[in-house]
Image (cartoon, grey):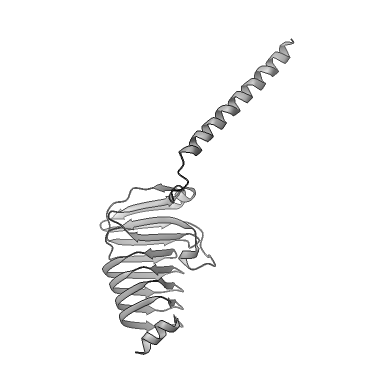
Amino acid sequence: MKTSSKIFLALLVLIVFSTLLVDLSLKSAYQKIRLDDPFKNYETMAVQPFHYLYLKGGNSYAIVFSQATKPTMKVMSSRKTFLTSTRHGDTLFIEFRVAGGSTKREPESLPRGLLIGGPAVREIQVDGSAVSLSNWKTDNLKVTLGGNASAGFDYTHITQLTINGNHNSICNFTKANYIGQFNLSLKHSSVAFLSEISYTSFIPQLRDSSLLIFNAATAAKLKK
């Protein structure tokens, strides 16, 4: 056999062997993935306790904020490089630099890019991001929205909620929300959708072409 043929055969065997090794490695890694794990595409990030939260970024991915026994944060693996977080005193600052200008303004209709959990928060400020507040039970919460921000509320039970909507922001109450005293201030063409919400008292203030949009049930309650 010619030397060139021997070299070609050796290279062919090496390529086949390397391909088999890569295939076995990928198969082993795949088998370790729990396909039923809802967080399989997320990476856990370290986060210190906080009572105030500032969110800034685009609105093409939703930031889901839920009540938890301890501070937690998970980011979609493919969007990890878009995340910056720092804490100053009692405030957690998060910048999630995903694209803005999404035509889907409802957080529940967007892919979940960032998941945050916290046991107690007093105030949330959102600048340009889409945030979903889910499963919250607390005495007092203040939410400030600006810069085309949007906030969706579901399964919340809040004794006193204050929302300030500015600069074309949207807040949407979608599922099983109970508010004791509800203080709502909207300006700069902001909108609030009161779809599924009950409350003891409601104090709205609207300016600059802002809107309140009710369904039949919430509109009937307002007239009482």
Residue extending farthest top: 1
Tell me residue 57's x, y (percent): 44, 60
- Relative to 80, say whether 29 is above or below: above
Tell me residue 165's x, y (percent): 39, 74
Residue drawn at x 49%, y 48% is 78
Q: Could you say which is closer to the camera, residue 204 or residue 154?
A: 154
Tell me residue 95's x, y (percent): 41, 57
Residue extending farthest right: 2
Residue drawn at x 33%, y 61% is 53
Q: Is residue 211 left or right of residue 139?
A: right
- Relative to 126, say whether 35 is above or below: above
Q: Quadrant of residue 199?
A: bottom left
Q: Could you tell me if residue 207 is visible in this image? A: no
Query: Dividing the image into 4 quarters, which one contains the N terminus?
Result: top right
Residue drawn at x 41%, y 64% is 132
Q: Could you tell me if residue 136 is visible in this image? A: yes
Q: Could you say which is closer to the camera, residue 50 or residue 195?
A: 195
Q: Is residue 154 left or right of residue 122?
A: right
Residue extending farthest bottom: 223
Residue drawn at x 39%, y 51% is 74
Q: How many marks?
A: 0
Query: Dividing the image into 4 quarters, which one contains the C terminus?
Result: bottom left
Tell me residue 207's x, y (percent): 41, 83
Q: Is residue 219 left or right of residue 139?
A: right
